[in-house]
Structures are given as C-alpha cells and as structure tokens.
Image: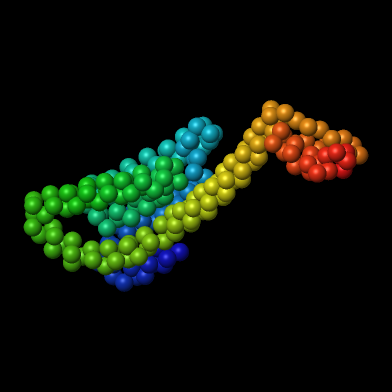
Amino acid sequence: AAIFGATILAAASGQQWAHWAETSFIADFSSYILLVPPILFHGRSDVLSSRSGSGRRYFALVLLAIYFAGAFWLVFIDRSYTSIAAFGPAFIWLALSWGISATAAACALVAVASILQIIIDVGTSASILSYYLASHILEAQVTASLSVFAFIPLAIVVVQRAALNRDIEQERASAMAAARLNRLVLDTISDGVVSFDHGGDVITANKSARNLLAPAPDKAAAGPT
C-alpha cells in the first residue's frame, strides 16, 4: 500500500516524478508482491530440504531464480542501483532455506558486485556519478525505507528459530535425563534384584541397597523387623 501510494503521488507531481514512479514502481512493487509466498511458508526452514514435497521445492527454486534474475537485470542492465532492494525477497528465501550465514554471504556478494559496477560506470563516464547523486537520491531514500519492511518477516523467522532452538534444547535435556534414569534401572536389574511382593506391588533394590533393607546388627538376633 505504501509503494502504491508513493507511486500515485509521484505520477501526479510532474514528468520528472513520473519517470521515478515508472522505474520505482516496476522495480519494487513487482518484487515485493512476491513476498507473499515466503510469508505463507513462514517459519518453514525445510522448504528446500528433502523432507519437503518435490512440488514445493521446485516452486521455491523457481521463485529464487525469478528474484535473482530480476534483481540482476535491475542492477546491472537497467542500472537501477537503488532497486537493490529487489534482492530482499530472495534474502528472505535464503534465510528460510539455508540459514542466516548463507543470507549474509549473499548480501555481501550483491553489495560487492554493485560497488564494482558503479566504479566501472563512473570510470567510463564521470557524469554518471553526478546524475546518480542528483536524480536518484530521493529514490534511494524511499526505496531504502521501504526495504526495511521486507526484512520484518526475516526478523520474525530469526526470533522463532531462537525459540525453537530453546525448545529443542529443553527436550534434549529431558531426553537425556530420562535416558540416565533408564540406564540406572537397567544397571539395578543387571546388578541383581531383590524383590518383595507387597500387596501386589513389587519393590526392587540392587545389591548395594540390601544393607538398607537388612536389620540393624543389634537386632539381627531378634529376627527381621
């Protein structure tokens, strides 16, 4: 809604704004509208794993290809450097699929490639830098502001992943405690069991516990208590 509203205002403000509206709307809106699938698969870290259905995996891979192809065209072919926010949905897919480290690596790769492309253009024609600073500074500010919203689902995923890891650690600790208890019972049985039938309930103890069940030495002559 924010992108659409900004586009309407830009189109109504004159020819120069209309040019910004045309490039920004096509670049950004067409990218952010594809944020719907990542939100639908929100929290699913196995979208591209073998545990997920083949149809969903291929669907995710196709979307990734669309994201990167579109962003590559915007940055390196159309020279819309400020439209680098088009990579936002692809980064979210990376975070959902391969984790934060892969996302950081992709961000670094795109940033380095964009800087190199700008350096090449400036070296070819010095006027490109002044044109970029003069006519695209507003687009850069607006696009950067809007791109923040693209990473809100990513932040939610990070928080949910942390909570999930905490739950996994708690379950692992509980499982280890249960395993130790089971091992203690098995050791008790293998050590030799003394059974006492008490009203249908079987009480067991290992050899080391027999002394606790035996009568005191001074009462041994009097018989068991």
Residue 203 in view: yes
Colour basis: rainbow
On the image, the x and y values in percent for residue 36 come to 49, 51
In which quadrant of the rendered image does the C terminus lie?
top right
Side of 15 relative to 101 (left or right) = left
Residue at the far bottom: name it.
13
State which quadrant residue 21 falls in. Answer: bottom left
Residue 26 in view: no
Residue visible at 49% across and 40% down?
47
On the image, the x and y values in percent for residue 170 come to 57, 49
From this view, report whether residue 70 is shown above or below residue 13: above
From this view, report whether residue 63 is shown above or below residue 88: above
Residue visible at 49% across and 43% down?
45
Side of 176 relative to 71 (left or right) = right
From this view, report whether residue 4 is shown above or below residue 198: below
From this view, report whether residue 2 is shown above or below residue 168: below
Residue visible at 48% across and 49% down?
38
Side of 5 relative to 56 (left or right) = left
Asked whether 71 or 223 is in front, the reply is 223
